Image: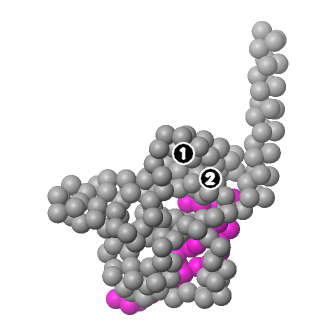
Amino acid sequence: MHLRINKTEIEELKSINHVLVDSDYLSMMYSNETIFKETYKLFGNKLTLDPFIKFEFLRDVFEPQIRANKELFINSKIFNSLPDHPELYVQVKNYAIELSQIYASQSKAKGVSLVDLMLAGQLVRTHDSAVILTGNRKDYPMIIFDTVSILNVEIPREDKVRGISLIKLNRLNLDSYRDKLEKMKQKISSEISKKINNI
């Protein structure tokens, strides 16, 4: 496997502090040394893991040696870890709930997992200082998130190229959908109040 990138687009990421690694790409890094080395060479100490990504990476591993190896990998110095404390969790959870409501209101919620929502919530919390590195672009709807760059992963044994997206939050779009969501809530609340008053 080899990583192919657009160096001009990557140059634009110099102001980014965190590259949040989604669990699918984390698995690719773990299972392929070339992808691991090329990703680290590309992003260096910006590679960052969310607590929910760590959980997802370990959740179905029961064999002690494999689990120990995976724990060593995600806890190594190459990854930054986002803080894992209650105040931040509440913030991220609230952003995730808000995003899920926006997705649902726009028929974009299908297939988006809790972990995807929490990682997207982290992106909202970190404002413009982070991007997500993911092989599952559909989990981060384009109504809210923009593609910064696409990394191509060549898989010679399968004669395939897989696109890996670097995505960022579109703050203007988020604010616009927040307004729409608030108006929808007010309308529903008003309709419910009328029904109650007519009883």
Quadrant in which residue 69 is drawn = bottom left
Asked if residue 166 is among those painted magenta in the image, a careful observer would answer: yes
Name the mark on residue 125.
2
Q: Earlier in the sequence, mark 1 or mark 2?
A: 1
Question: Disc 1, disc 2: CB below 8 Å?
Answer: yes
Q: Hey, what amino acid is under mark 2?
A: Arg
Q: Which residue is drawn at 60% across and 88% down?
A: 7
Please, which residue is most extreme toward the left here?
A: 64
The magenta span reads 139-168
Q: Hey, what amino acid is under mark 1?
A: Leu
Quadrant in which residue 98 is drawn = top right
Can residue 146 be seen?
yes
For mark 2, give the secondary structure: helix
Return the x and y of residue 65 as percentages of the image width and height: 17, 63
CA gap between label 1 and label 2 equals: 9 Å
Residue wearing tag 1: 88
